Image (tube, rainbow, N blue to C red):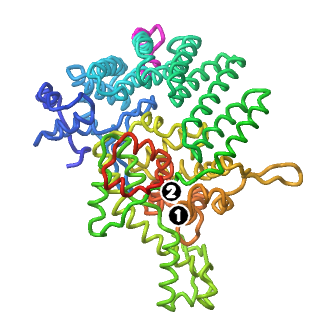
Amino acid sequence: MSIQEVEVTLEELQSLDQDKILSACKRPVYYELESAFGNIKDSNAAKLLSATCSMHLKPENPKAPFSPKFIMQDRRGFIANDFSKKSLNALSQFCSSVTIPELQARLADISWVTKVGSVEHAYIAIEAYLESAKKLLAGGDTWVYPAERIERALRLSCMFRRDSQRPDLFRNLADFITSEINNKKLDEPPFYALRLLKLSHECGVGDDEWILDTAEEIAKARFEIGDTRTAINGWECALHSANSTRNKTKQQEIWREIAACHVKDSESQDGGLIAAGCLLKAIDALSKVPNTKQERLELYETMRDHQIESLHQLHEFSTPAQDISEIAHQAKIQVQGKDFFDMLFRLGVLVSRPTDINRLKEQAIEQMQSSFAWMFGGTHIDHDGITVATVPAGMGLNDNQDGSVTWSTMMKNIGIDHQLAVQGQIRPALNELMIQHHVSEYALESILKNNPFIPYGHEYFYIKGITFGLEGDFLSACHILIPQIENSLRYVARSQGEEPTTLHGDGSQERSGLKFLLEHPAIIEVLGQDIVGNLQAILIDKIYGDLRNQMSHGYMPAGYFYGIAPVFLWWLVLHIVMLSLGSHWKQNYQPESAANNAIKPDS
């Protein structure tokens, strides 16, 4: 029976033992409640409540706060509108008698967003979210879950601030948030306070001066102890308030502080690519401040010194060959880790690897030597039957080892390699990660901040793109990430002192295109031939991927984004951004000897 066919009465819902349900949960959060209700057999009421708790909370979206647990090509998890009208009516009546704040908030919010309930359900949800947050904070396990509930309550309460409605709800939340920030702004680390501070700016909690002063206090404290990355977060929060008040002097002071953080961050690195990336961010920050040309030139010279050093951090991990019959099992074992970061790093770096381009070429030449099919050439058509590439007949193998015939064979083989990786390694490991962890955009923000592949101001694109991929929505992931890959390649070129633009005779400048970037020696040196070759095959090759062209012009049907090449591209982006965190992973997670053996000694 599908969830749409399940019809539950108020009496059936009230018959459930809420205390017993709560005792079966490690912590009172919705995914624990989903499991607890799911373990009750032969109860439509429990089945319905389990389905309501399966949806992910997206507090940043005021009008659509719930998303499906997963999205695949032909199916997805539940959304609020999947439930029958009779069941929704029963849930709206039931929520006032629910004793578990987390469940009460969810049911009241569902009643509100589906328009089955009244404005009173929104009020119930606001108070229940706050109560749930307080209980989670008392548990002291993590700040992420309480912050999400506070955010949802605050965004809801903003809708009812008029005197004729419930302004007290917003005031109560504002007082609570202000108190939490003041009490925890110097915590170790202050991520919770910073998130509430950013939320305060967005929703009008406190004035801009208080937000600016508090953010500045956090930033200075973190800078003093060498935590430059959190200090940057603090300064960026202060910058929002300075922008709101149009305080140009303060804006320039903050940009200087941000630049100082990046410089200090570069000094703590071992040189090379990461240090150069930090200095490039410092140069970009100083470009917002007048009369800093000489300072930027000095930083540029230091950045160039770093570029002379080893620039191979982005391809220092490899995994040993696996027996194909064991590959999925090994992927699930390989991804097991201590926490979300550990498992995400393993998924991106240890579970699979980009196809070896040299090996691919050798394999293609060997195939051509043992067959004569390549001698007749061929054409390649897309899903609409349009010819997108032609391969001429081969005239002599020795003369064509670097030609189109060899490349055509390589592209056929890379598709097989990617299929094995996606189906045997990436998807099994991804499923294992998602079983054990809920994806938080804020956790990803802390992981991806100051990444040498991601330009300043573009972090959120990668956060959203990686989040969508983790949740199985590769259509959305590709539409966000593909344009960002091209921009990041320009950023990598800039970090190597190259200018990825062309100056025309009329004085105008044009940014270099993707094909040019993927053939640029500096980018190949930084990312490595294998990463660049895989990007080339997936993004621009007409025989295999051509995703950039197909996506940009809308040629691809939606279902194609759940195929092998898009999934592998998503993983390859994850691979690139996680590689620079290899030193942090080795230092803090004490990886087992098997993983250490998979890491080159000079990494």
How many residues crowd around disc 2 within 10 Å: few (fewer than 14), some, or many (20 or more)?
many
Q: CA distance from mark 1 to mark 2?
A: 9 Å
- The correct choice, above or below, for 139 with respect to 208 in the image is below
Measured as percent of width and height from the top left, residue 325 is found at 27, 69
Q: Secondary structure at mark 1?
A: helix
Instruction: Pick out the residue farthest to the right.
Output: 506
Q: In the rendered structure, does residue 102 fall within the stretch colored magenta?
A: no
The residue under the point 37% across, 35% down is 66
Left or right relative to 425: residue 1: left
Q: Quadrant of residue 109?
A: top left
Q: Which residue is mark 2?
A: 315
**Residue 330 vertical placement versus 394 (above, below):** above
Q: Which residue is found at the position 36% from the left and 33% from the top?
A: 57
- The residue segment tinted magenta is 155-172
Q: Is residue 166 visible?
A: no
Please, what is the three-letter code of the amino acid marked with disc 2? Answer: His
Q: How many marks?
A: 2
Task: Name which of mark 1 and mark 2 comes first in the sequence.
Answer: 2
Predominant secondary structure, magenta span:
helix
**Marks 2 and 1: in contact by CB < 8 Å?**
yes
Q: Position of residue 335 (x, y in %)?
A: 32, 51
Mark carried by residue 312:
none
